[in-house]
Image: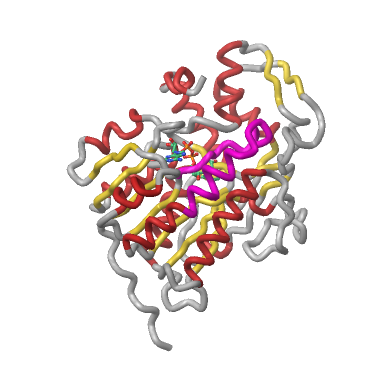
Amino acid sequence: MSAAPQPPALRHAFVTGAAGFIGSTLVDRLLADGVRVTGWDNLSTGQRRFLEGATRHPGFRLLEGDNLDLPALRAAMAGSDFVFHLAANADIKDGWSHPEKDLHQNTIATFNVLEAMRANGVRRIAFSSTGSVYGEALVTPDRPTPEDDAFPVQTSLYGASKAAGEGLIAAYAEGGQLDEAYLFRFVSILGERYTHGHVFDFYRQLLDHPDHLRVLGDGSQRKSYLYVQDCIAAILHVARLGTARGARHRTQVYNLGTPEFVQVKDSIRFICGALGLNPRLDFTGGDRGWIGDNPFIFLDTRRIQATGWKPRLTIEQGVVQTLRWLEANRWVYESRR
Ligand SMILES: NC(=O)c1ccc[n+]([C@@H]2O[C@H](COP(=O)([O-])OP(=O)(O)OC[C@H]3O[C@@H](n4cnc5c(N)ncnc54)[C@H](O)[C@@H]3O)[C@@H](O)[C@H]2O)c1
């Protein structure tokens, strides 16, 4: 059997969404690994403070700009050899308040990233997609959802816009415009620099009124979570292995998550236990928290585990670590009001 061709070295990464929760964590890891990084961000939800360490590093530069500005994006990307495309509207809940936002920020923006890559001859991309692209899994409603689940019915604008972004990336790759395209479908991510999600919302409420907590849905929703450092480790592990090289398809899809799930009620127990609180729980009712909320998110992660990666933190450890970070960094609440 002939060995898969060696992937080219990763020397100069272009990270969209570099000032975000996950993007800034990726930037720090790349710099620590000796990779030059150009960070690209419009600072709509990103935080300059997350890049304080990176900006002191000689291998880093932050370019402030918007993915919807294709000429500026094209110019910024010059000289890069790998694109990590993380910039997005990452908020799934409020899709119907601004239906055009997901289309622009997640689909058209991804098209612009691909066009900028094509213009610059950058032929490798990793994309932060989401388990939400499965909508409510059709074939495996009570089992972990595999990457090759039946073609899903979309249940959120966010999921639909990410699925469209995935489709564009695959079309560019299979159409010969890219050599390697990695589509990572994440469960919800937890950890340091977390600025949105249920731990953020619950802790904010408990700061305001420690005696009661309003919970969307009936608390029985079952969800999986992954610690941010484990997420970054998986992305870089696959990028370095170059699993698309020599494969039948240049597009490779990986679910990223832990091999466990918890109920929202469990997560509340972890949070309240860590805070020493016993609030009254006011459930809004129903088996889902918002339109498009999937009451069971649990991804089959055997494909990524077969590459040799595995998560280090359990969901409970990830929830508590997130909470500890929020306790020490309450300033994020002011910046996200
Ligand atoms: N956090 C999660 O649980 C989770 C789960 C699944 C997928 N994802 C995906 O991971 C990625 C990162 O998410 P995150 O949680 O770090 O979110 P985030 O909001 O912290 O980061 C997104 C970053 O992109 C920037 N940005 C947004 N629109 C931009 C634009 N038009 N041009 C340039 N920059 C822009 C923002 O300023 C921000 O810094 C997103 O693509 C998101 O959809 C996140």
| Residue displayed at 33% across by 37% down | 64
Q: Is residue 15 magenta?
A: no
Q: What is the total number of numbered labels drawn onto the structure image?
A: 0
Residue 199 in the figure: left or right of residue 335 = right
User: As rendered, which of 64 and 256 lies closer to the eye?
Assistant: 64
Find residue 15 and report its horizontal and vertical position in percent.
Answer: 36, 48
Find residue 260 and report its horizontal and vertical position in percent.
Answer: 63, 49
User: As rendered, which of 93 and 95 lies closer to the eye?
Assistant: 95
| Residue displayed at 50% across by 42% down | 88
239 in relation to 248, above or below: above
226 in relation to 78, above or below: above
Residue 217 visible in the displayed image: yes
Query: In the rendered image, which quarter is residue 237 located in?
Result: bottom left
Find residue 310 and report its horizontal and vertical position in percent.
Answer: 49, 56
In the displayed image of the protein, which residue is found farthest to the front?
Answer: 71
Query: In the rendered image, which quarter is residue 102 located in?
Result: top right
* Magenta residues (range): 87-111
| Residue displayed at 77% across by 58% down | 138
Query: In the rendered image, which quarter is residue 137 located in?
Result: bottom right
Find residue 159 and report its horizontal and vertical position in percent.
Answer: 63, 48
Q: Main secondary structure of the magenta part?
A: helix
